[in-house]
Image (spheres, rainbow, N blue to C red):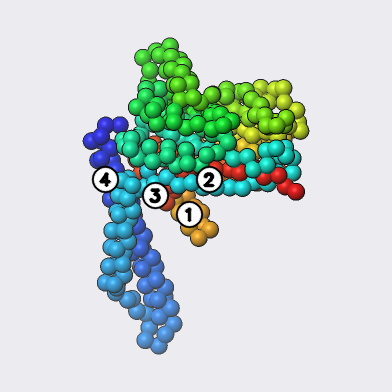
Amino acid sequence: MSRFFQIISHAFLIVFAAEVVFALFLLLGDAYRLLIAISSNFQPEGFQILSRSTYWVDFAFIMFCLTVVLFIFGITRGKYAYRVIKHTLYFNDLPENFDGFTITQISDVHAGSFTKPKQVQKGIDLIKAQKSDLFVFTGDLVNNAASEIVPYLGHFSQIKAPFGQYAILGNHDYGDYMKWPSENDKIQNLQQLKTYHQELGFRLLLDEHVELNKNGEKIILAGIENWGIGFGERGNLNKALQGTAPNDFKILLSHDPSHWDAQVKNHPSKIQLALAGHTHGMQFGIEAFGFKWSPVKYRYKHWAGIKFENGRYLNVNRGFGFIGFSGRIGIWPEITVIELKRKV
């Protein structure tokens, strides 16, 4: 997307959204006037229609201006307003030596959308400051082309953890959303992206697993290729778990949260914790005072945060980057830190 086209499209979006808010508040005022008019029909003075209050029109205009300000903030500041969200999760079957083990998760970098390396570095510094035992990345390193990550190799390669850095691929990483000169070019792009993961120090888990060992005990970290309803069902969960035991403690990296509902939460080999991303929280919504809403909820049952079901946990990261709309409003870029605790 060219810079000029992006500016024009975002200006249109801001004005359109503000106009919708303005019209909505006028509609609410008109609905109130209609109710008053209907109730007045039962009064001695008969049916009366109140004129539209100038105060209400002024209030609607204030909301119009507020919407414009929110969108401008989201585009200029919100998309880099990284925040750390911490969760402590308890398990009956966590190996004793992993009690207190910490994991930092990010997802959906979408490096091709970044325009401010210094702001990205602030997010990297926050990741490093967590000093977690393990770092995982749950897919969508780029929008389409592997070359998008090149300007940021020096940034993300700074991330190190004692038990390693692991990653999976997301739906955007396969290059499905752009036209390639040939199928071979598309294949070469994916291969180059895998090479860049190596340069970052991220080990890709492609339908496979590794053992993380600590003082004679282990947990399983598995990762699959992208599997998502409507976004390609490439991953093979059974292949990723091959060689593991049903009673092993398992953590799964799977980009799309729809996979958890479809295959993971009821899998016969228990997966205690699944980590996903993909939704971005639609980069727009409200999270305040315990209330959480985004339009993406109408597409994804679990779209952000922790879900516990059938004795298993899912965490959906809201994403580190952005795509499409070059901003975030209410749903800020997320760095997740999860502490595993043994339930006693």
In this view, which residue lies farthest toward the bottom?
Answer: 44
Residue situated in front as seen by the camera: 240 or 43? 240
Q: Counting residues from the N terminus, which is met first, the one under dot 4 or under dot 2?
A: 4
How far apart are labels 2 and 3 at the CA level?
Answer: 15 Å
71 up-or-down from 158: above or below:
below
Q: Which mark is residue 287?
A: 1
- Whether residues under marks 1 and 2 lie with C-beta atoms below 8 angstroms apart, the answer is yes
Discs 4/2, front: 2
Question: Callout 4: few (<14), some (14-19), or many (20+) C-alpha neighbours within 10 Å?
Answer: some
Considering the numbered disc 4 on the image, is that residue within a helix, a strand or a loop? Answer: helix
Q: Upstream in the sequence, badge 4 or badge 1?
A: 4
Q: Is residue 194 above or below residue 77?
A: above
The residue to which callout 3 is attached is 329
As drawn, the label of residue 124 is none
Q: Residue 58 falls in which quadrant of the image?
A: bottom left
Give, as a three-letter code, the residue at label 1.
Glu
Residue 283 position (above or below residue 33)? above
Image disc number at residue 11:
4
Q: Residue at x 31, y 70 (%)?
A: 56
Nearer mark to the viewer, of 3 and 4: 3
